[in-house]
Every structure is written in structure tokens, then in C-alpha cells.
Amino acid sequence: MEQLSLLAAGDWRAREAAHVQRVRRYADPYLARRSAGRKHPVEDFLFTYYTQKPGQLLRWHPGAGVALTGQPAAARIGWKHYRSLDGGELAAVGLPAGTAAVTFDRGSFLADRHEAVAFAEIILRGTAARPAQFGCFGLHEWAMVYRQDKFDLRHEYLQLRLGPDGTDKVVEENRIRCSHFDAFRFYTPDAIPRNELVPSRENQRDMEQPGCLHANMDLYKWAYKLLPALPSELVMDCFELSWRIRAMDMQASPYDLADWGYPAIRIETPDGKAAYVEHQRAFAAEAAALRKRLALELAPLTSPERP
């Protein structure tokens, strides 16, 4: 029998309310912009690039090994990968027979998501084991617009800070060594051969490294893909780190975002490169702590000793 900890209705509803408030700080402005047909180059990204939508993110989950009590918990029987406690489990947590109580359904989750769980563990553990690299200076964003007509830019409503020629010159005068496939795949055709590495989906598990901004942003992706096995507070910790990384990533990009409230990190200069690396190292340290927490949450899901 799985060992469960008990959360009374008042306790978990308070955590649920706090989570909803935390999510709405980010989701509500995005939804308002979407309704008005407006875009934001920084603050829309986590809701448009990643597959987790605001409504899904708003749902609070306690994670594995937690039982929720109270009548509102009964509604979760209709949620994917939740189940009612059986009589023995109710007795084990001190509840009388017939009490409305639910918990994460480990069996159905693993039957449905075992491949995603296995791949997340490979990525998280492999990335954590490699040395961090801090010499990319965010040039992946520059490679995405290299020798590109302005009407074909990924963010066509933005201006290039140095103009097309100045942007191309930065690409040509710097080494480009991006290790992250989901950045590399957006390179322009002329930029692809300038990358010293050839990341692919097939070699992703061997190339992800903990200094990479995008690998650290993707902690949010691995976290939400493991819901509802993870507590939503951990997912939001990953979300908020990803949010701040995205802001810095775009500040170091070739786009002029000053009017959006994001002053440039001028990576074409020595001072700009130094500032980029300082931010990158700080984010890598935060990501390492989150990666460790995610690995700890994954361990019970992948343990062969557990039924």
C-alpha cells in the first residue's frame, strides 16, 4: 500500500488559492492581450511556445503521495490521473470509511506517461552531470535572423537594434556554439553551418548542458509534463525561473526592446558579454537547485521496487 500524507480541506484549499493567485499574475495579462489581438515579445512566450495553457496551469495539484479530503476533493475523481482512496488507505490516514478523499493515481499515470517520465529523467540527470558552458553569449537569437529579410523575421513587429547589416556582422565576428536543438532548429539556412555543434533531437540527451539558458527554461516543460505527479508549487518555481530567463534572453537578442521596458544587454561589446555571463551563471545556479528537486520528485516514479 502506498504511504500517503493527509491534507485537510482547509489546508489544501488555501494552497490552491495561493497557486491560482500566483498564476494569474502572468496569465491574466496574456489572456487580455490575446483577446485584444496584441502581442508581447517577452511575456507571451511561455504561453505560446510551450504546450501548457493558462487554464491547465491554473489547476493546483498536490503531487504524488498526498491525499486530499473534503467534498471539493471529490470533483477530482473526474480529473485525469486521480483516484479515490480505498478503505485500507482511508484507515491508514485516520479517516472513516466513506470519507471523500482522493490522491494521485500512480498506476494510470505511469501506464499513460512512462515514456515521458523516462525521457525527462534522462534529460535532467544527464544535464546535471555535465559541466556548464558559458561562452554562447545568446548568439542563437542572432543566428535566427542572420541574412534574413526583415519581412521574414520571427518577430516581424520588432526592429533590429543594429539593423540587418550590423546584426549579420555580429554573427560573422563571433563563434557560435549552441548546444540546444530547440534553439538551433530556428536558425536561418545561412546560420546553420556557422554553429560549431550540430544538435539534433536524436543527440539531445547527450548535448544538453546546465549553462544553457534554453535548457534551464525547459525545466518548466519537464515539470508540467509530469503533472499531476509533481506539486504545482514546484512547477511554478520552474515557470518563474523560465520567465526571468526569457526576459534576459531577449534583452541579449538583436531586437530593440527598450520601448517594451527591456534595456539591451549589448553582447556585441566586452561589457555586454560579461553581463550576459554573470546573469547566465546565476540562472544556472538556480536551475541546478530546481533540477535536483525535479529529480527527487521523479525518483519514486522510476523506482523499480515500487509496484
Image (cartoon, rainbow, N blue to C red):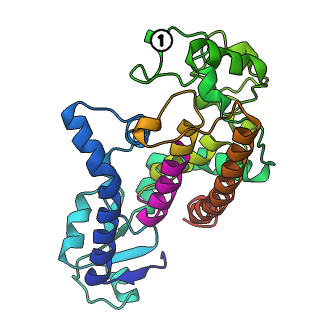
- Foreground residue among 272 and 21: 272
Residue assigned mark 1: 150
The spot of residue 74 in percent (x, y) is: 21, 70
Classify residue 35 by image quadrant: top left
Residue 208 shows in this picture: no
Please identify the quadrant where the C terminus is shown.
bottom right
Q: Secondary structure at mark 1?
A: helix
Report the magenta residues as a range: 228-246
Q: Is residue 236 magenta?
A: yes
Classify residue 37 by image quadrant: top left
Give the side of residue 156 with respect to residue 187, left or right: left
Q: Is residue 16 magenta?
A: no
The residue under the point 46% across, 50% down is 111
At label 1, counting other C-alpha atoms closer than 10 Å, the crowd grade (few under 14, some 14-19, many 20 or more) is some
Give the side of residue 154 with respect to residue 22, left or right: right
Residue 281 shows in this picture: yes
The residue under the point 62% across, 10% down is 189
Q: Is residue 27 above or below residue 83?
A: above
The residue under the point 41% across, 55% down is 108
Q: Amino acid at mark 1?
A: Lys
